[in-house]
Amino acid sequence: MQIAHPFHLELRHATIPTYIVSYVFPVLFVLYELYRVGQWIATQGFHFAAFKEMGYEYLLMLTFFAIQLAVQAAFLVWTWLGRHPDLEHRLGNLTLGLVASAAVLAFDYALQVAF
């Protein structure tokens, strides 16, 4: 008889605070990027040649990413010090949140460099 081990995706086994800390920042990044690009298209059209001149907004996004790193690191330390049993699930969620935010930053950077 073959023993099948069920596949449990780590991301679904974390707690509510983990989801909030992990995914609030990426959602805010996506909403801000949609607003920023949408506003650009509404005023300038699809001419992204001068998009890189909006450098202060990208700097704002990088600062927000640094805040995300600090908050998630503090949350991870708090989890580790509290000896929570789902540390590895929280680590997976926090990593995915950072990757999602980095993907939005990479998309914005690609818009700046490509044109």
Image (cartoon, helix red, strand yellow):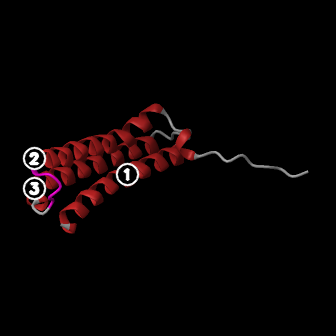
Q: Residue at x 24, y 47 (%)?
A: 33
Q: Furthest-right residue in view? A: 1
Residue 87 falls left or right of residue 34 = right
Mark in the foreground, 2 or 1: 2
Distance Cα–Cα, label 2 vs label 3: 14 Å
Q: Amino acid at mark 2?
A: Thr
Could you tell me how far apart the alpha carbons at marks 2 and 1 are, in whole angstroms?
28 Å
User: From the viewer's perspective, is residue 107 above or below residue 114?
Assistant: above
**Boundaries of the magenta span:** 43-48
Closer to the camera, 44 or 89?
44
Q: Which residue is mark 2?
A: 43
Q: Mark 1, residues whose alpha carbon is within 10 Å: few (<14), some, or many (≥20)?
A: some
Q: Sequence order check: which comes first, mark 2 or mark 1?
A: 2
Which residue does the numbered mark 3 point to in the structure image? 54
Badge 3 density bin: few <14, some 14–19, many ≥20, Cα 10 Å: few
Can you tell which of label 1 and label 3 is closer to the viewer? 3
Quick check: is 56 in the magenta stretch?
no
> Is 47 left, or right, of 87 in this rendering?
left
Label 1's element?
A: helix
- Asked if disc 1 and disc 3 are in contact, CB closer than 8 Å, the reply is no
Residue 108 is situated, as x and y percent measured from the top left of the image, at 24, 57
Which residue appears at 35% of the width and 49% of the height? Answer: 73
Location of mark 1 (residue) = 100
> Residue at left 75%, top 49%?
5
Q: Quadrant of residue 35?
A: top left
